[in-house]
Amino acid sequence: MNLKRMLLLVLFVFSLMLVKRYFRNCHVEELQLSDWFQPRKRPDVITKTDWLAPVLWEGTFDRRVLEKHYRRCNITVGLAVFATGRFAEENLRPFLHSANKYFMTGYRVIFYVMVDSFFKLPQIEPSHLRTFKVFKVSTGSGRPDGSLEPMKSLGEHIVSHIQGEVDFLFSMAANQVFQSEFGVETLGPMVAQLHAWWYFRNTKNLPYERRPASAACIPFGQGDFYYDSLMVGGTPQNILDFIENYLNGVIHDNKNGLHSTYEKHLNKYFYLNKPSMLLSPEYSWDLAFSPPPEIQYVKVAHASHRKL
C-alpha cells in the first residue's frame, strides 16, 4: 500500500470515529442547567457569574440527574496529566492512584500521562473502563514554569488522536491528590478552576499580567476572577483553541522580550473567552491554608508550589 492510500485510509477511519461519536450522543436530549443546578442551596458563596455560568460548590448540584443523563450519552473522558521535573515520579504515583479511585468513577477514562523521562507506572487496579497512555514530552523551552513544550505536545496529541477518542478532556498538573468524588458535574464546554487563595482575598488587585506589551495583559480595573493553572477542562476542540491562543501569546511576548507565565495567559484567555463553568476552590484546595467554612468537601488537594 503506497503512502497516499495509507493517508486516505487513516483519514477515513478517523472520520468514521467522529461520525460514530456524533450519532452516539446526538439522540440524547440536552440537559438544562435548571435540571441539575441548585444555586440557592449555597447562599454563603458565589454560585453564578455575571455571564450566568454556574460556580460548582458542594450542595449545588444533583448528581443523580447528571448521572442519568451522561450514562445515556455513553461518554469517554480524557485526563492529561503533566509530570515533569525532579519530583515527577514522586508526584505521579499518588495522583494516578487517587484519580483512578475518584475521577469519573463508572465512566470510561483515558489517562494521557505526559512525562519528560520514562519510568514504570505505579501498579493500578485493572479495569476495563480505565486506559493509560504514556507520552514523552520535551521541557527544554527555558520558560520558568516549564509549560510551553508540554502544552504544545498536548495540542499535537489532541489533533492527532485525542479529539477522536474522548468527549471531554481535562488537563492537570501531577502535584495534586484527589480526595473525594470528581464527577460528571464538572463536565462542560470550557471549565475553569478558581484559585483557592485568591478567591478568598478581599482585593481587586488580582495578580494579572499588567504590562501592556504582553499578550497576557489585563489592565488595572478589569478582570473577573483569578483562575488556577493546575486544571483546565472542556471539549477537546476548546482545549485546543486555548492551547493555540497560549502558544501565540508566548510568540508575541518573545518578540517583545517578555516572559509571562502560563497562568497569566490562562487568565487572559478566560477574561476574553468566558468559561461555561467554574469549579469552586473545593476542587483544588491549597493545603497550606486551613479550609474556611465555605469549603465543605475538598475534592482535590495540592501543596503550595509557588509564591503568591
Image: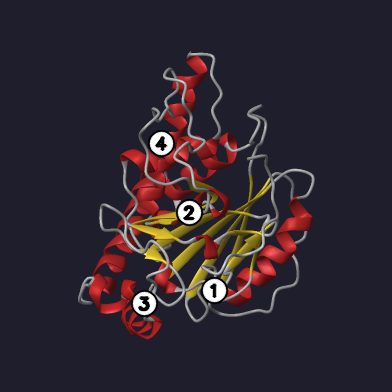
On the image, the x and y values in percent for residue 181 come to 54, 76
On the image, the x and y values in percent for residue 54 come to 33, 63
Residue matched to label 1:
296
Label 3 CA crowd tier, 10 Å (few <14, some 14–19, many 20+): some
Residue type marked 2:
Leu
Q: Residue furthest front?
A: 202
Residue matched to label 4:
268
Residue type marked 3:
Lys
Viewer-proximal residue, 219 or 22?
Answer: 219
Residue type marked 1:
Gln
- Sequence-wise, the earlier of marks 1 and 4 is 4
Pointer 1 with pointer 4, Cβ within 8 A: no
Instruction: Determine the CA span between mark 2 and mark 4.
Output: 14 Å
Residue shown at 47% from the left, 45% from the top: 226
Pointer 2 with pointer 4, Cβ within 8 A: no
Quadrant in which the C terminus is drawn: top right
Nearest-to-viewer mark from 4 and 3 = 3
Residue matched to label 2:
194
Pointer 2 with pointer 3, Cβ within 8 A: no
Measured along the vertical axis of the image, is residue 307 above or below residue 179? above
Label 4 CA crowd tier, 10 Å (few <14, some 14–19, many 20+): many
Residue matched to label 3:
41
Helix, strand or loop status at disc 4: helix
Helix, strand or loop status at disc 2: strand
- Sequence-wise, the earlier of marks 1 and 2 is 2
